[in-house]
Image (cartoon, grey):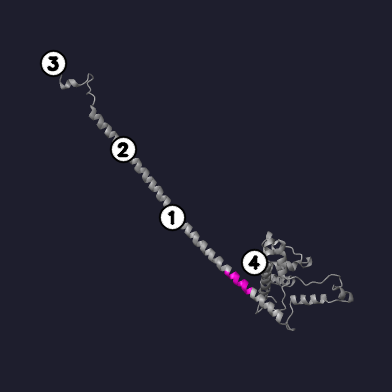
Amino acid sequence: MSSSARPTKKAKKSATGQPAAAGPSAIDDLTALTTAQLYSLSAKRHRDYSREIVRMAQEERDRAHVALQEMQSRLERANEHLEKMEENSRDAHREYLDAKNLLIRVRQSSNSTVPPMNIALDDSSVEDILGIISKKPSGNTAASSGKSPGGKKSQKFPYIEDILVSMAKSGQLHKGTKLSLAECHLVNKKDNSQFVNTMKLVEELWTEEEELFLRSSREEIEESMEEAKIIAETISLRCLTKLNEFEGREDPTPTNHQKPSFVSVGNRARRVFIGRKKGDENLV
């Protein structure tokens, strides 16, 4: 066959003048390149996502650390507050024991000694004398019946502890009623001003624990009547002691002739309140 009949390399081009289609090896190379690019893109996305997760975890850790510091600070403040409350409770308990011991000494002293006749009389002493005089019969009829000429049995003014126990038993204090606004069947209407002044003084002097106890329910008061009486007597004695301090006495300890009747204490408390308004600390 002649050389003119053989196809040349140039004759391998298509009729359009373009090179022939790529072979299988070129397709494999293109597939491998595309796969590598896809893997690279996927790895980049995964890396970015991992970095975002790490960043969010760090922020969460920082927030948790800040919250932990705040909780520790709150815990420290709570511990300080608890220590103060415990200290106040110990102080109140010591004051309660001191008042209770003082009450015992006053009772023992009043039972074992007789007050001298040259002691200056205050309102409570005058009340006792008036009570004795009012009980004295004016005639045979009064002597036989044990009543005053008016036909009514005379009574001394009730003490502060009697009024407090009575109001606690009635349930008024459990409802949150202020002492000065409460009602008591032991108090006459004509003595209401002394009652109000006495109750205002009690509200100044009773402790938080004493108030909470006396504001218990009627059932709880009935079950703890002895404790209620002791607390009421302690408050009553504290009123006398504080009034002596307000009046500038060297020894504020209540004397034997000082009685915690609400009328006597109310009159003395009124003078204290008036003195406060005028700016006078020492009462004459």
Span highlighted in magenta in the image: 90-99
**Disc 4 to disc 3, C-alpha distance:** 130 Å
The residue shown at (89%, 76%) is: 140
Q: State whether residue 34 is above or below residue 111.
A: above
Instruction: Say if mark 2 contacts mark 4, CB within 8 Å.
Output: no
Q: What residue type is labelled 4?
A: Glu
Residue position for label 1: 65
Please tell me which of labels 2 and 3 falls first in the chain: 3
**Disc 4 to disc 1, C-alpha distance:** 44 Å
Residue position for label 2: 39
Q: What residue type is labelled 1?
A: His
* SS for callout 1: helix
Residue position for label 4: 210
**Disc 2 to disc 1, C-alpha distance:** 38 Å
Please tell me which of labels 2 and 1 falls first in the chain: 2
Image coords of residue 256 (percent x, y): 71, 79
Can you tell which of label 4 and label 1 is closer to the viewer? 4
Location of the C terminus (image quadrant): bottom right
* SS for callout 3: helix
